[in-house]
Amino acid sequence: MLMSVAAVAENSVIGYLNRIPWPFIKEDMDHFRSLTLGHTVVMGRNTCQSLKNPLKNRTNIVITRDKAYDRHGFITVNNPNKVIEIGETSDVYIIGGQEIYSLFLPFVDLMYITKIKLNPMGDVFYPEFKEEEWNVEVELDKYNLAFLTYRRQSPSFLKKDI
């Protein structure tokens, strides 16, 4: 199953200058870790480069147009359809950035969104989506964040290749 996981500010910002534009939030990182541990995570090259190391105990896939891109601990793919194929047999989490979220949004069945109750400056945004196509559940709302789960109303098997 393909899923998306992101921390998103009220103004849809998810990044600024290839970094998260708010201070470290332990609850969000714990939530991210609990969702993705033991699974496959998919990211774009910029997100990959923002990480010091591959995420532990996860299969790390980076999608890039650069056929020569190679980084230790990451599987590089140039064809997004390979990720969709993997998602048919195991849980795959799309973890950013903006272009990768946009590319896979039509194929995602679940979105785990941590809503950050801030409006920071940003240059990377989570893509717009039609909320009426999703059922939303509030898992937890406290401090300056809310953990939301969006479940697609229509089945993903109706989708086509990228």
Image (cartoon, rainbow, N blue to C red):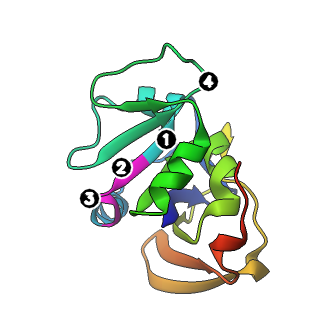
For the question of whether residue 96 can be seen, the reply is no
Residue 61 as seen in the image, left or right of residue 133? left
Which of pointers 1 and 2 lies earlier in the amino acid sequence?
Answer: 2
Which of pointers 4 and 3 lies earlier in the amino acid sequence?
Answer: 3
In the image, the segment drawn in magenta is: 35-41
Under circle 1, the secondary element is strand
Query: Cβ–Cβ below 8 Å for labels 1 and 3?
Result: no
Residue 26 image point, x, y percent:
29, 59
- In the rendered image, which residue does mark 1 sit on? 43
- In the rendered image, which residue does mark 2 sit on? 24
The disc at residue 37 is 3
Q: How many angstroms separate mark 1 from mark 3 (CA)? A: 15 Å
Q: Residue at x 51, y 58 (%)?
A: 7
Q: Mark 4 against mark 3, which lies toward the viewer? A: 4
Residue 65 as seen in the image, left or right of residue 33? right
Does residue 20 belong to the magenta stretch? Answer: no
Q: Mark 4 against mark 2, which lies toward the viewer? A: 4
Please state which amino acid type lies under the numbered disc 4.
Answer: Arg
Counting every numbered tag in the picture gives 4
Does residue 36 belong to the magenta stretch? Answer: yes
- In the rendered image, which residue does mark 4 sit on? 65
Q: Mark 3 against mark 2, which lies toward the viewer? A: 3
Query: Cβ–Cβ below 8 Å for labels 4 and 1?
Result: no
